[in-house]
Amino acid sequence: MHEDAGTLLEGLTEAQRDAVTTMDGPLLVLAGPGSGKTTVVTRRIAWLIAHGVPPWRILALTFTNKAAGAMRDRVDLLLQQGDVDARDVTCMTYHGFCARILRQYADAAGVPPGFSIYDTTDRRSVLKQAVRKAELDPANWTPASVGESISSCKSMLVTADAHEEHAGGDFYTRTIGRVYRAYEEIMHANDALDFDDLLMRMALMLRDDAAVRDTLQDRYRHLMIDEYQDTNHAQFLIATSLVGPGRNICVVGDPDQSIYAWRGADVQNILEFEEQFPNAKVVPLGRNFRSTGHVVAASAQLIGHNASHMQKELHTQLEDGARVLLQPAGDEHEEAASILAAFKEHASSGIQWNEMAVLYRINALSRVLEQAFRDGGVPYVVARGTAFYERAEIKDALAYLRLVVNRNDDTALRRVINSPPRGIGKTSLSRVEQHAMLGNIRLGEALREAGQIDTMAARAARSIAAFVEMIDRWRATADGGSLIMDLPDLVTCVIRESGLEKTFKTGRGDEDMARLENLDELVTAAAEWTPPPGDESTESATILEQLAAWLESIALVSDADMVDPERGAVTLMTLHAAKGLEFDVVAIAGLEQGLLPHGRSMGEENGLEEERRLCYVGMTRARSRLSLTWAHRRTVRGITERAMPSQFLGELPDDAVERAVDHDPWSGGRSAVPDTNWKVGMTVRHSTFGLGVIRRVIHRPRGTTATVDFLEYGQRTLLVAHAKLERVDPEERPWEGIDVPL
């Protein structure tokens, strides 16, 4: 035993000590938000080494290089007084570890030892080639959509051969199988593996090759896995296959923070750990060192509504602090203004801009927030994402619109002439460019003469002619050719007729859905745009002139000179991107039904639970100040629609929240937060109608309604806020002696 091992336990809670000192057998550490997870993991590794476990016998797997590096450094620091080298611990990402082992056992894995690893850009290029090789229309089978399907297959260890064998008669599945086969053939020809291959090939080798499996189990006697709730099937199989006879596996995670199902993560891996490893020890880390009392209490009660929630008593020894503010607004602009005003107030009290963050469910919500912070002179950055007008799909749409205004905008022309693909490839474009050079004319003019170029293929010439005609048609419409179209109508028309809308509608992934939402938001931006004060010339301007002025206002936006290096900038980011971060002040915007929870999750128990976990993750990013905001009306695609507050707001404890006064005339002076106390199947009693069973619950803008099947009066739909329903415990046998079943 290392003489200073006792110091490894200094400052730890009883639960943390228990996790650190448990050396043998399967161990599940349930690490709630802010519970000192990294401290426990690093001290446990140091504890093992201090108690005689050779560092090279320890394998720690993480999800990011940054986490792996930080873990190694902290363990090394803890043991720097001794004669051991913590750098001998194998502490790597899943992908890094798999790449190392696959090269070492290349023959057993069936991979070339000198394989290349293709990153996201390389993979996208191969996917494009595979679609062409499978003789499919690239406009309908995008790299994003087919890539997501292939990735899903690999995470479930379904090879191209296996997929082909079980494809059945479904057209989509059979077509994906063709692309998958073509993709694998190209990758094989290039001696290349993608990130999914690293996991799949490793998992299959461990599953099928007992000799390799036994060798690795003997080498790594102690296995630790961080963020276990984020593992997919392949990662789960890798982890469980590495566990030797000693069953020394320690997994650390929190099922309540599993928010990556769309990426293949399976929360059941952590929920069923005790079934996989009977007699496993479970240590819950419930103390939150990050957040104040009201933030912890509110988030704990919210996540408690999930059936998948594993009980751990969440608490903090910090003071209660400010209550969680529930802030309604008339519309998204009022919402953004209220967040801006609150942040300015916090700044005046001494909180730095970089200690504040605004979180949201979908990227499209950032546009109005960006505008408010820009107009308010508050520095901001869009973290782990792209500012709204810098997103690829938005730049594509704007490039088309720029061509409507200026046919000679060669940069815009080159960006979109074949995006989405329309049969105008690099060869065809180079011939047009050569024609322009020889004739000393602009590229746009040369396009109109494409049919006269001898070397131009007939199909490409027709595609170019159709492209030119499309741009000309839009310009004629905008330049006084239509009395019924306005600016947002024109933007909608361009997005639809250019093929951008179809491209993302045919995709099946969340990425394509987000891009569609962003394009909808661009239409809303056009609808909301007003000329700058004093510019009276735009009042009677044509749509073309309005478009030019709007595009100019976008082009002049610049954020770079707003950031104060001393105080930093407010962070705007999605809830998914915020995982693992923390801020003094957090505002979560857009807590409305259809946004959070997202519309795709409605009616799906698993989907709704993941949305609730996502909200929980967002709430637990806050150290001391948390506000949840929503709007009564929100504009989508230029059309203002009524919105209703998220059902999650009704799941928060009254004693931990402060409900701001709602001045919106539509709300009747109060905010109709959904009442989630009433569930389908619940037995209830009404003073007039008697006993009944709830058959349906609907959250409406004016409040929550329940359809109850009453024994004597049949079905009645009641507004629960006024119905004075009484819940009846079924164990009281309220129906005993009554013949008419409900």
Image (spheres, helix red, strand yellow):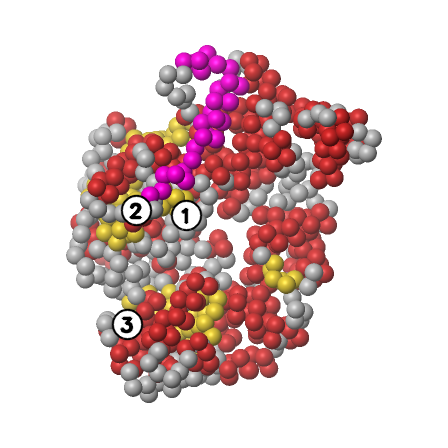
Write down the quadrant of residue 426 in the picture.
top right
Left or right of 64: which side holds 479?
right
Write down the quadrant of residue 464 in the picture.
top right
Numbered tag placed on residue 239 in the rendering: none
Choose between 48 and 298: the one closer to the eye.
48
Q: Secondary structure at mark 2?
A: loop
Give the mark count. Answer: 3
Q: For the residues marked 3 and 1, what is the alpha-carbon distance in whole angstroms?
A: 32 Å
Left or right of 95: which side holds 459?
right
Give residue 92's position: percent from left, percent from top: 47, 69
Choose between 212 and 103: the one closer to the eye.
103
Where are the magenta residues, as a range?
536-564
> What amino acid is found at the position of numbered circle 2 in the picture?
Arg
Q: For the residues marked 2 and 3, what is the alpha-carbon distance in whole angstroms?
A: 35 Å
Choose between 244 and 273: the one closer to the eye.
244
Q: Is residue 436 above or below residue 122?
A: above
For disc 3, the neighbor class at 10 Å (few under 14, some 14 to 19, many from 20) is: many
Give the prevailing secondary structure in the magenta stretch.
helix
| Residue occupying image coordinates x 53% and y 23% | 490
Q: Secondary structure at mark 1?
A: loop
Give residue 57's position: percent from left, percent from top: 46, 81
Give residue 288's position: percent from left, percent from top: 26, 61
For disc 1, the neighbor class at 10 Å (few under 14, some 14 to 19, many from 20) is: some
Residue 528, can we see it? Answer: yes
Q: Which of disc 1 and disc 2 is earlier in sequence? A: 1
> Which residue matches tag 1?
383
> Which residue matches tag 3?
16
> Which residue matches tag 2?
567
